[in-house]
Each structure stands twice: as C-alpha cells, then as structure tokens.
Image (cartoon, rainbow, N blue to C red):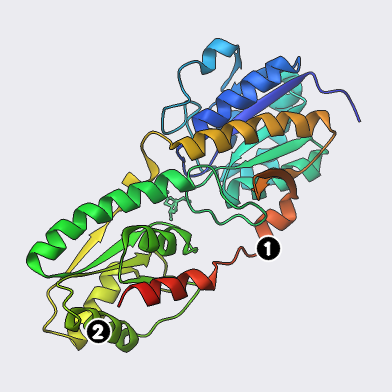
Amino acid sequence: MSKINSIGILTSGGDAPGMNAAIRAVTRAGIFAGFRVFGIFRGYKGLILDEIEEFSTQNVSNIIQRGGTILKTARCKEFTTPEGRQCAYDVMKRRGIDALVVIGGDGSLTGARIFGNEFSLPIIGLPGTIDNDLYGTDSTIGYDTALNTIMECVDKIRDTATSHERLFFVEVMGRDAGFLALNGALASGAEAAIIPEISMQVDQLGELIGHGFRKSKNSSIVLVAESPVTGGAMGLAQRVKEEYPDYDVRVTILGHLQRGGSPTAFDRILASRMGAAAIDALLDDQRNVMIGIRNDEIVYVPFTKAIKNEKRVNPQKLEVLRRLSI
Ligand code: F6P
C-alpha cells in the first residue's frame, strides 16, 4: 500500500456534540504521527468544491468543549453520483490528500464506503450521530450528550405536568431508532417509551397510563421516538385524545435542541479516543472501517457491517421501564 503523508478530515450529515472533540483528536494525533492534516469544510460538498485548509494544532485549540462542528456540515446530493465522487477524487489528488477521516452517521459512512471502494482510498469512519444507530459500537459520538439534554428537558416538563395533572407526549429524535426515546424514558422516570422497534397499541398505552393515574400519580410522561412507525407524538396524542377524552393531553417536540450544547465528559473522552484510534487505524493499514467502542475497548468495524447490520435495542430495558412505571 502506498505511504500516507496527508490526510483530510470532514464532518457530514447531522451535527452531533463531540464532533469538535473528534476533529481535535484526529488533527493532533495525525500531526503527532507526522501527517499533514487538512480540514475539509461542509462535508463532501466542500471536498467537491475544494473548500480545504491545512490545519495546525492551533486550528483545533479551544474546541473540545464546543457543540456543533467547526468544519460545518452538509448533506450532499452530488456525492451520491459517480460524477460528483470523481470531482472529489480529483480534488484529493490535486491537493495530495492520501486518506480521509469521515465523521458522521449512516449516510455519511455509506458515502465513504462507496468512495473508498471506487478509488481504492484509505478511509476511516468515526460514528458521529446523536441517534446511536450504528452497528458495532456501544455508543456513537453525541448520543450521550443528547440523552442528557432529553433528561434535563423532561425533568422540566415534569414540573408543569405534575402541577396541571397532565399527560405529556414528548417526541425525541432518533430517525428510525428508539435508543434516545427508550434510554431517555429510563433516565427521566417516564411512564412509557414508544419506539419504532416495538409496536404498542393505543389501548395498551391508555391502560398503562390509566394504571399510573389510578395509582395516585397525578401526571404521566410518554417519550415517543420520531418515526413514521410510531406516528410521532402528535399522531399518538390525537389517537389517545379520541379514545380517552378525559385525559388532559399536551405534546412537546424537543427537535433540534437535542443536537446542540457542550458535549458531556463521556462524549469528549469517546471522541478523543476514537479520533486517536482513526490515526492508529491508518498507520495499521486499515481501510474502510469505522472505529467503534465495545466494553471500553476500541474496535474496527467494517463499513458494511456498521451500516447494514441492525443495532438492536435491549428489550430488558423496556421491561425495566414497564416495571418501574407502576
Ligand atoms: O441523524 C440525526 C438527526 O438529528 C435525526 O435524529 C433526525 O431525524 C435528523 O437528523 C434531522 O435532520 P435535519 O437536521 O436535516 O432536520
């Protein structure tokens, strides 16, 4: 394999807290290893348009604590076409960039896999998404911060829910995955979680909530994962209102505030370790792998597995939630 002298780093897809900590780690570990490091702005779009700047260690000073991504991010249609990827490759050749580190979720790593195979490029992925939906890693960068944000928001909603004796449906992100909803529910002591992985009927839900009300609880909170499968918080609230007109129902959609904020210690440490591991992987001649963490150990997960295999929610957690919501 040809020797790597220069690497490019980009963030792509939805931003996630901890991406900056990862950029810092890749840059510094890369420079430490003797590489030239190039920051690529606006994801694959910036690669195609040559929005690239060489980074020194100073470029990544004072960013470990910042949410978002200093490299900006984008979702790029052009990169899904062979012509777009050819442009990106030409820019890399012209700039002398031999390898890429891509920080992003499912879609970003899918792009990386295709690009890497097409041009035999060494590409390492870091799982950067609040959704935690990538197979082969216990956690993705940004997930823990988003989970803590959800917990803090639900704590606040509970104050008003309790005062008014209301039933709240709180919708959280996750795209097609229920990790944020299920673990957010456990962390905030919610009465139930509606997640796309497990179907729940309105009558089951009504019974569960009614049981709580009867048992002297004066409010209930249900976390709902955004997804066409769950119908979202609005849809569910509507159905429950029709079936149980006595309940005083309200809906809160947490939305993009879940993506912001300073990363937790967990995410900063995870991003730092994963960023350094991306450089180790390149030195180790690894290609087309995502860095994962399992049982506190760094692992290499082939892109195909990370993207295609389904990461399952732990059904025991739902069972615990059910038992504790009486
Ligand atoms: O993948 C991260 C995520 O925040 C999902 O949870 C959500 O469905 C989606 O991105 C929202 O995307 P956008 O920022 O384009 O609205």
Residue 49 position (above or below residue 199): above
Between discs 2 and 1, the one toward the N terminus = 2
- Given residues 287 and 116, the one toward you in this image is 287
Of all residues, the one furthest to the right in this rendering is 1
Give left or right: position of 303 versus 236: right
Which class describes the residues within 10 Å of circle 2: few (<14), some (14-19), or many (20+)?
Answer: some
Left or right of 87 on screen, residue 244: left
Towards the viewer: 286 or 53: 286
User: Comparing marks 2 and 1, which lies closer to the viewer?
Assistant: 2
Q: What element carries label 1?
A: loop
| Count of marks placed on residues | 2
Q: Is mark 2 on a helix, strand or loop?
A: helix
Quadrant containing the N terminus is top right
Name the residue type under label 1: Asn
Residue at the image point whose x is 74% and y is 37% from the top: 123
Left/right of residue 76 with respect to residue 259 in the rendered view: right
Figure quadrant of the C terminus: bottom left
Residue of label 2 = 211
Where does residue 306 sit, x and y in percent of width and height?
68, 54
Residue 232 screen position, x and y as percent: 34, 68
Q: In this view, does 250 lie above or below 264?
A: below
Residue placed at 15% from the left, 57% from the top? 159
Residue 309: assigned label = 1
Tell me, for residue 165, which label it has, or none.
none
Amino acid tagged 2: His
Q: Can residue 86 be seen in this view?
A: yes
Q: Dividing the picture into quarters, in which one does residue 12 lie? A: top right
